[in-house]
Image (cartoon, rainbow, N blue to C red):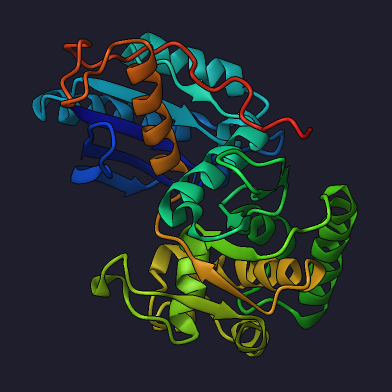
């Protein structure tokens, strides 16, 4: 079946279309995306402005047409911290549904962390032991840990690269005192979260997802995306420490010249690097592996599993849905596995 996943993130709005069937990896068919940093469309009260809402509605309308033209049979539509934490988030969701007929599923931070972990586990399989995964988005940072398909512990922290850049940096490059203040804030957030995690059970595969981590790995020498998803990419804390200092002294224009850093991400890559380095230090991680699958893939795989269980998807991948399902029932309860 052809399945779409509409991802309304803090930096980018993205429709990914895949061909999927039980027991097989989702094969990308097409995608449609654009930069729409909703976190930059917040007014002084924390509400998404009229311009931001209008651009969001326009993109979602386009995405529906793309999905229908591609004969997608089912579509998951979700949003994360940018809408979840906006003071008018509920009104924005209602407007989107009224004008586009799409009901966006509002994921909690814990659900983001758990579904991202789920994708990482499916990518790595059972050849690795425990998994500790880090993900840095535009509005939040998710951390999840476990031994099975779902994590035993998952948290979401207000440490998104876009959010921190907006709230803490006024200059370009930022003033050293602003960098120091932000470092203390990031470390405080992570140190407060760390004690809630269970003791890590060896062997542990430490992984990272998100564009922020992919960019940081590329800056420090990892293979480019053109090399394909199966090339191993690592990020070492020692290398990242050197680059945090370099990035702090660079303007966003200069950062945009670095490999793997787009103009859109150039402003916030420093804040993202600071979060990544602090997370590795707090959790005692010297090196981590970049995983190509993340939240979107986790939701796709979860959807396939659910359709199989309900009899809406046969073993040959044929779906009984028959049309783009713009208002699917929630398939996201109980994402964090109970410890025994």
| Residue at the image position 62 percent from the left and 79 percent from the top | 173
Q: Answer with left or right where residue 338 lies relative to residue 47.
A: right
Residue 1 showing in the rendered view: yes
Give x and y (percent) for residue 72: 17, 25
Figure quadrant of the N terminus: top left
Q: Nearer the viewer, residue 162 or 3?
A: 3
Q: Quadrant of residue 280?
A: bottom right
Q: Answer with left or right where residue 316 lies relative to residue 111.
A: left
Give x and y (percent) for residue 124: 45, 57
Indicate whether 220 appears above or below 205: below
Q: Answer with left or right where residue 101 lies relative to residue 279.
A: left
| Residue at the image position 50 percent from the left and 31 percent from the top | 79
| Residue at the image position 23 percent from the left and 35 percent from the top | 20
Indicate whether 121 appears above or below 316: below
Figure quadrant of the C terminus: top right
Residue 133 showing in the rendered view: no
Q: Answer with left or right where residue 272 lies relative to residue 234.
A: right
Q: How many marks?
A: 0
Give x and y (percent) for residue 5: 33, 33
Indicate whether 28 appears above or below 227: above
Indicate whether 19 appears above or below 206: above
Give x and y (percent) for residue 264: 42, 62
């Amino acid at each position: 079946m052809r399945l779409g996943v509409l991802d309304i993130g803090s930096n980018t709005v993205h429709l990914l279309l895949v061909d999927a069937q039980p027991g097989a990896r989702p094969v990308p068919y097409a995608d449609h995306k654009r930069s729409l940093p909703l976190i930059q469309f917040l007014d002084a009260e924390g509400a998404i402005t009229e311009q931001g809402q209008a651009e969001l509605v326009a993109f979602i309308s386009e995405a529906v047409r793309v999905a229908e033209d591609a004969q997608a049979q089912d579509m998951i539509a979700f949003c994360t911290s940018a809408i979840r934490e906006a003071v008018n988030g509920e009104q924005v969701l209602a407007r989107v549904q009224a004008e586009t007929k799409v009901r966006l599923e509002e994921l909690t931070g814990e659900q983001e962390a758990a579904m991202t972990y789920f994708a990482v586990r499916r990518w790595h399989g059972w050849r690795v032991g425990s998994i500790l995964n880090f993900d840095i988005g535009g509005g939040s940072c998710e951390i999840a840990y476990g031994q099975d398909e779902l994590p035993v512990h998952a948290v979401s922290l207000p440490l998104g690269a876009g959010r921190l850049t907006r709230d803490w940096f006024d200059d370009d490059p930022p003033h050293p005192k602003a960098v120091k203040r932000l470092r203390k804030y990031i470390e405080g957030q992570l140190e407060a979260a760390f004690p809630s995690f269970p003791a890590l059970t060896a062997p542990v595969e430490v992984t990272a997802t998100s564009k922020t981590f992919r960019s940081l790995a590329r800056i420090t020498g990892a293979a480019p995306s053109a090399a394909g998803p199966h090339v191993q990419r690592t990020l070492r804390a020692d290398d990242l420490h050197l680059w945090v200092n370099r990035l702090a002294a660079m303007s966003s224009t200069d950062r945009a010249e670095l490999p793997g850093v787009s103009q859109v991400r150039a402003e916030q890559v420093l804040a993202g690097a600071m979060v990544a380095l602090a997370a590795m230090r707090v959790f005692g991680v010297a090196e981590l592996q970049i995983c190509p699958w993340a939240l979107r893939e986790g939701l796709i795989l979860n959807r396939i599993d659910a359709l199989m269980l309900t009899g809406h998807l046969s073993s040959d991948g044929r779906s009984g849905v028959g049309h783009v399902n713009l208002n699917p029932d929630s398939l996201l309860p109980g994402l964090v596995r109970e410890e025994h």
